[in-house]
Image (cartoon, helix red, strand yellow):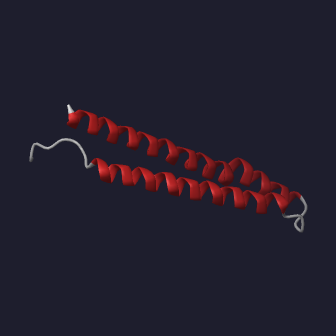
Amino acid sequence: MNGFYGGDTESMGEQSRRLQARSGDLLVLRTALDAVVRQEQAWQGPDADAFRAQWVGGAGAELLRLGERLQVLSGELRAHASEQDAASDA
């Protein structure tokens, strides 16, 4: 063990920015897919209704949850980097 505790805060900041960007990409994709699923009128009937319900309550909701979770993790990583910088400056 080398006795070093902490992190490379520049790298942590970059990772935070990447998480934030990919989260945004995921949420944009979810919005686009949601529009496709909800606007498709050529497919009607109970199977179509069940598919749309599965999207809304399943995959669509999960993508939204995941995108939001990535945003939270990005913020946590950014906060840890700031704490590390503050501790190192002391």
Q: Is residue 58 left or right of residue 41?
A: left
Q: Nearer the viewer, residue 58 or 78?
A: 78
Residue at figure coordinates x 34%, y 49% from the top left: 12
Q: Position of residue 2 (x, y in %)?
A: 9, 47
Q: Quadrant of residue 83?
A: top left
Q: Is residue 42 left or right of residue 10?
A: right
Residue at figure coordinates x 57%, y 45% from the top left: 68
* Count of picture labels: 0
Q: Nearer the viewer, residue 70 or 21?
A: 21
Q: Is residue 57 left or right of residue 83?
A: right
Please, which residue is most extreme toward the top here? 90
Q: Position of residue 85 (x, y in %)?
A: 27, 39
Residue at figure coordinates x 57%, y 50% from the top left: 67
Q: Position of residue 77 (x, y in %)?
A: 39, 43
Q: Quadrant of the C terminus?
A: top left
Please, which residue is most extreme toward the bottom here? 42
Q: Quadrant of residue 26?
A: bottom right
Q: Position of residue 50 (x, y in %)?
A: 80, 55
Please, which residue is most extreme toward the front here? 89
Residue at figure coordinates x 62%, y 54% from the top left: 27
Q: Is residue 85 left or right of residue 63?
A: left
